[in-house]
Image (cartoon, coloured by chain):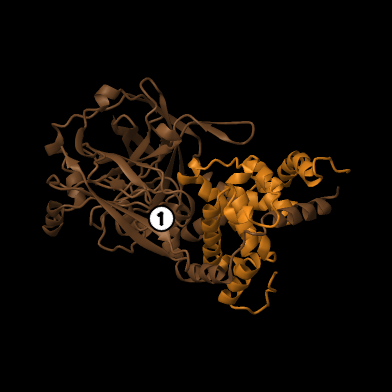
Amino acid sequence: MEHAEVPGMNREERLRCWIESYSDQILRMCFLYLSDQTQAEDALQDTWIKAWKHMDDYERKGIENAKAWLMRIAINTCKDHQRTGWFRHIDKRKAPEDLPQQLLQAADTDHSLSLLVMALPDKYKQVILLHYYQGLTQKETAQALGLSPAAVLRRLRSAEAQLKQILSGGEAYDE
Amino acid sequence: MTNDRMQAAVRQKLDSELSALRTSAQQRENLCQNAIGGYQVKRKLTVGLMIALILFLTTVTALAMELSGTGVLDWLYRRDREQEMTTTVPEVSGATEHRTASLEVRELITDGYGVYLSLAVTPKEEGTLFLSNYTDPYWTKAAELGFPTDDPEQSIAEWAAVNGYQQLKEIRLYGAYTENEDGSATSENLFHIVRNPIHIESDGTSVFLIACENKGEGHVYKLCYRVLTYPDEETYHQSYDDPVLENAIVEYDDYEERVITFTVDTPQGMEAEVLAEYLPDPEHEQSSEFPQVTGLRILRTPLSAYYDVTYVHPAPGELRRYYFGEPSFITDQLYDRSVRMTGWYAEPVSGGSQQFHELHSCILPDPPLEEITLECAMEKRDPEFGDTIWCVYKYLPLLLQ
């Protein structure tokens, strides 16, 4: 459930509001990006640390879409984590049984889309997570990734075919 | 299928699949407290100090030396006494001259697993200080990189200003790689550089300590670099989450890629002195709950000391769950000027598990150490409260040669 951000909130209140609203979304996005729950949790913490640290920028620039701003921080944090030596030992290709226990024990045990997203090359994964999963516009996605909107569009088109197959249970969607 | 429908379908399906992955109210409170109260500490964890295993090199003589006022860097610059120790001066070719600096590989050795080199970068313009990859000069503490300072909180930028450096540049060092069609990269040789120790010499030369995996005799190592200029603090931090601005900044200088190539002759490279070793000993029982150190060898050269720590994978399952990633290592010799370098690679061992290597460099004091102890510790996350706690779990004596 999203908590409404109220004008006039002080910084701490705003951060708390964001944390309540977006922590789960960011955690899941980081998990899909990093294919590791512990790393995703660390990335989530880092995201909030950066958000707090850069609250000045947020206020000064009059950023209107807080979610887009936060997702941009989160995806860049994931990229930072990828640069670490630790990340080189992670095999991003997950088998269903490699997923965290709490996912395996959940009511919905179909993880086909999650596994597909995790297995995608980073450049496709980024646009899918930001645009399709987090609902950023193509322009916001482009800004977050430092790409042109045309490049984002190309990547989305390339990844769409695989997504549609999963979403339709193996059959292609009608356009 | 429209774009909106596609978005909704993806969101619904992923949220459904990952519904069990969520934060508790207590976790969210911890996230908030950590963000507001502890971001500097947390940042240290994320950029290089995700410390799970710490190497303390301690000695009575080292402590006595420190108390007597002999600093670590005094040892570093005492080269005259060390001249009898021969090390390999490699044949280096490629772009050793840049518009802004001259580059020189001063040492190059291997212990069989790792290749260690020291790269001296001498600025051509007075008042310029070179740092290495992704070092935030406005945030990183000068003491953390081994800079001589009495103020543990002094940033590199503050240190530079006090010491007459008006311009900060970064030499971004990396191994050669090939970009694949799918966007991934295949590396020819990875160099471990980030947050390495940096030695600043009196003429402004920065000496970087670098390590990479030994690729065997005949391999041509390609060390690539680019040079960029750090902007002012405000611009630099604005760029932190802004890839467009970051790209603009890195292009601020002559951002052309340059390459230095060299080979490593193993027999010559072994001329460095083996200072100490750890070999598995049945008397040193190590719990399988924690990473088990299987070997350590410290090589000493005129410029530095290099070591390769090997360990087998930490405990799997739930215990593993609460630790911060894999172990890494730093050196801390009970001096404020601790320096370190971490590296990483793995090799398969019998039974299907993997043995990990950490490649490091550090500075050892002079006179030579009489006793060295490896202190193994992990930083773990408290599963109930989410904060971090230290856990020293083993002391291992090293064999001095």
Is residue B173 visible to the viewer in this orientation of the structure?
yes
Residue shown at the point (32%, 44%) measured from the top left: B293
Q: Position of residue B373 (x, y in %)?
A: 21, 49
Q: Colour of chain A?
A: orange
Q: Colour of chain B?
A: brown
Q: Position of residue B361 (x, y in %)?
A: 30, 42
Residue named by callout 1? B137
Is residue B235 visible to the viewer in this orientation of the structure?
no
Which of the 4 quarters of the picture holds residue B401? top left
Badge 1: residue crowd in 10 Å (few <14, some 14–19, many ≥20): many
In the image, residue A2 above or below residue B45: below
Question: Outermost residue toward the top?
Answer: B218
Q: Along the horizontal axis of the image, is B249 left or right of B130? A: right
Q: Nearer the viewer, residue A108 or B226?
A: A108
Q: Position of residue B345 (x, y in %)?
A: 42, 37
Q: Nearer the viewer, residue B268 or B106?
A: B268
Q: Along the horizontal axis of the image, is A68 left or right of B246? A: right
Residue shown at the point (39%, 42%) measured from the top left: B193
Residue shown at the point (22%, 36%) measured from the top left: B301
Q: Position of residue B291 (x, y in %)?
A: 37, 48
Q: Chain of mark 1?
A: B
